[in-house]
Amino acid sequence: MTFGGLLGRAAAVLAIAAALALAMFLYARGWAPSRDQYPAQGVTISADDGAVDWGTLAAQGTDFAYIRAAQGSDMRDAAFAANWRGARAAGMRYGAMLDYSLCRLASEQATRFMTTVPRDNAALPPAIRLTFDPACPARPGRDLVLSELNTLINLVEGHAGKPVLLNVTEAFDKVYDVGSGINRTLWLDGNFFPPDYATRPWVMWTATDMRHIDGVDGPVRWDVVAP
């Protein structure tokens, strides 16, 4: 084969690979688990997602939304109040989420949550997201972390009047094994494949953080409830 022929074949292979990669990317953008298997599906929303058209989001089959209220004790999500009102007005089920920080006291984080989220009997149980924040290098021992989490949980549950969900990432669970240390409902993460990293079964699963859906500009975390 001539040099020109080799170049032509290489170009064709690259073109096919690029087409396949594009097809996979487009498939991933629109993918969600089957409604037959997971009838209840929803989204996690924060100020990072920009302005949300809640009516359009609801019309796309979004059953519920977890809305970030605060990060640690320092930051109240700037879009929380608007998103809370929007989800409720759209007839969607809604709940509040706190992004936990290992660099702040549990009591301070609970105060931020309680002064941000109104008491609302119609709201879903509150969620606490447990993940490593690159801005927080602290890695306390497991006993201290579980003690702080129990303090936080008790305060948040006292405010909400409902048991919390613990949204635990795989990296966080690997270090602290939250599932065996705190008896609360688990919400786990895992793109495209159901997660199995915790010591107890999950009740909610973030099935993808790549989904694009009308009503939100950009990818969202798409969540499903175990049947």
Image (tube, rainbow, N blue to C red):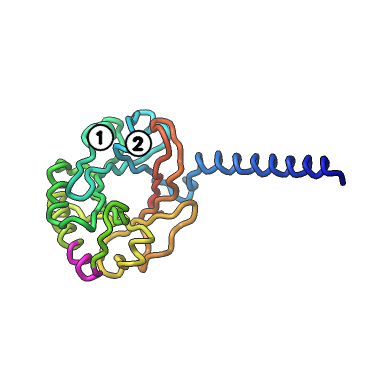
> Whole-percent x and y of residue 169?
36, 57
Cα separation between marks 1 and 2: 9 Å
Q: Identify the residue at image location x=69%, y=43%.
A: 14
Q: What residue sits 39% from the left and 47% below the top? A: 223
The answer to whether marks 1 and 2 mark residues whose Cβ atoms lie closer than 8 Å is: yes
Q: Where is residue 134 in the image (x, y as percent from the top left)?
A: 32, 53
| In this view, 8 is above or below 59 | below
Residue 191 appears at what percent x and percent y?
46, 52
Q: Nearer the viewer, residue 121 or 223?
A: 223
Q: Is residue 206 magenta?
A: no
Within 10 Å of the Cα at label 1, are there few (<14), some (14-19), or many (20+) other Cα atoms?
some
Q: Is residue 60 left or right of residue 82?
A: right
- Is residue 82 placed above or below 165 in the rendered structure? above
Q: In the rendered structure, which amino acid carries the disc numbered 1?
A: Ala
Q: Quadrant of residue 185?
A: bottom left
Question: Residue pushed farthest right?
Answer: 1
Q: Mark 2 points at which residue?
A: 49
Image-quadrant location for residue 196: bottom left
- The mark that comes first in sequence, 1 or 2, is 2
Q: Residue at 60% across / 39% down in the picture?
A: 22
Crowding around mark 2 (Cα neighbors within 10 Å: few <14, some 14 to 19, many 20+) is some
- Which residue is more in the foreground, 193 or 63? 193
Q: Residue 119 appears in which quarter of the rendering?
A: top left
Q: Residue 32 carries which label?
A: none
Residue bearing mark 1 = 79
- What span is colored magenta in the figure? 141-148
| Quadrant showing the C terminus | bottom left
- Mark 2 falls on what kind of element? helix
Q: In this picture, is 16 found above or below 150?
A: above
